[in-house]
Image: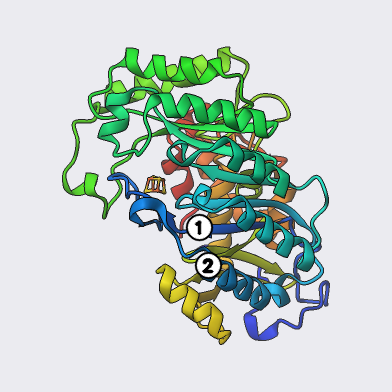
Amino acid sequence: MKKLVPVPQEEEHDGRPGVRGRPGLVALPPLSIYIHVPWCVHKCPYCDFNSHERKGGEIPEREYLQALQADLEQALPDVWGRQVSTVFFGGGTPSLLSADAIDQIIGLLRATLSLPPDTEITLEANPGTAEAARFQGYAQAGVNRISLGIQSFNDDKLRRLGRIHDAAQARAAIEMAQRAVNRVNLDLMFALPQQTLAECERDIQEALSYDTGHLSLYHLTLEPNTVFAKYPPPVPGDELSATMQDRVAELAQAAGFNRYEVSAYARPGEICQHNLNYWQFGDYLGIGPGAHSKISFQNRIIRQARARMPDAWMRLAEARTGKHIVEERTLKHEDLGFEFMLNALRLREGVEGGLFIERTGLSLMSLLPDMRRAAERGLLEPGLNRIQATPQGWRFLNDLQMEFLH
Ligand code: SF4
């Protein structure tokens, strides 16, 4: 078991920073808000998110809004007085919500939390639910970034992925999003069932042709407890998948995108601040069914999870007994190094060494043996000023992260 420089045990916490012998966080990290919208028109066979099929897309919007308000109000004491740096509507399919509902939620956030006018507010949208008027309404409500789940521009691949949209709808949704907001992200996947390298290249080239500021390019993975895990489709083998990954990165980088995280590519000034906050081990309050939170106090860091099933979460949140939070735990000191590295090492440029101290309250010396070992294996850049994977470490990120697991 590794010896870490201690922060106080939970019973020692008195909320005061800098008490002698009781090191803590000098400053609290930036705080993001995540809002989970749990419904989809159809459950995609590869999806392991907390998403629940509502045929026809009819969702209980009024009940959801009431429960969301109850959830947020009960969470306020944990984040009281803190400024919000980003807001993210994720799902599920947030674009099933009306513009009026999004307006009410952002209004609620503005009424209860400190939300500067230029706060990044992202909404995930499914091209199959896109409507120009709705996107304009989201923008008027304060959404300034739309993330579109395109996945592919190939109709055959979209069908195999069980998507509700086709390529024409994907193209129309991009144009609608670009008319509504200045910042648009496109999510695409590669290594799709029976995909050839040429098909993969065509998808990426088309995505690049829209001149959006951000791309998220994911390798399709067959996650446990999905239809694809039970009935695996004929996906490309390891060698072809690796070639696709390299080609995807080459094409995006040649078009002026910086691959700043394993799957995230941005033009200058277009990095997703919400996701960056996760990777820099910032705080986030997640509200809605199944949402997770990480919240720092001066002398402890907690993680929470909300009830996963939408009906149960709505009933429990509305009861205002706190039972909609089904899990809450204080992070143990010995886990902080691994948790921090799990996130920070995903960033191509890593993070400054000092960020570890700032976010965890631990000395970086506590990670020294692990860092040395990883550097000797050629996976981590040597030195303490920056925590950064080498190109080799980035390629075999799992191996590198495991160096910090105890
Ligand atoms: S639309 Fe997205 S969240 Fe919904 S089932 Fe498909 S992949 Fe999952």
The disc at residue 37 is 1
Q: Residue at x 54, y 28 (%)?
A: 174
The disc at residue 371 is none
Q: Residue at x 42, y 42 (%)?
A: 399
Q: Can you give x and y, in whole percent of width and height, for residue 218 in the image? A: 43, 34
Q: Can you give x and y, in whole percent of width and height, for residue 260 in the image? A: 60, 31
Task: Compare marks 2 and 1 and give the one earlier in the sequence.
Answer: 1
Q: Nearer the viewer, residue 219 or 163?
A: 163
Q: CA distance from mark 2 to mark 1?
A: 9 Å
Q: Can you give x and y, in whole percent of width and height, for residue 35 in the image? A: 58, 58
Q: Is mark 2 within 8 Å of ligand 1?
A: no
Q: Residues within 10 Å of mark 2 (few under 14, many from 20)?
A: many
Type of the residue with mark 1: Val
Q: Quadrant of residue 310?
A: bottom left
Type of the residue with mark 2: Tyr
Q: Residues within 10 Å of mark 1 (few under 14, many from 20)?
A: many
Q: Which residue is mark 2?
A: 64
Q: Is residue 112 left or right of residue 157?
A: right
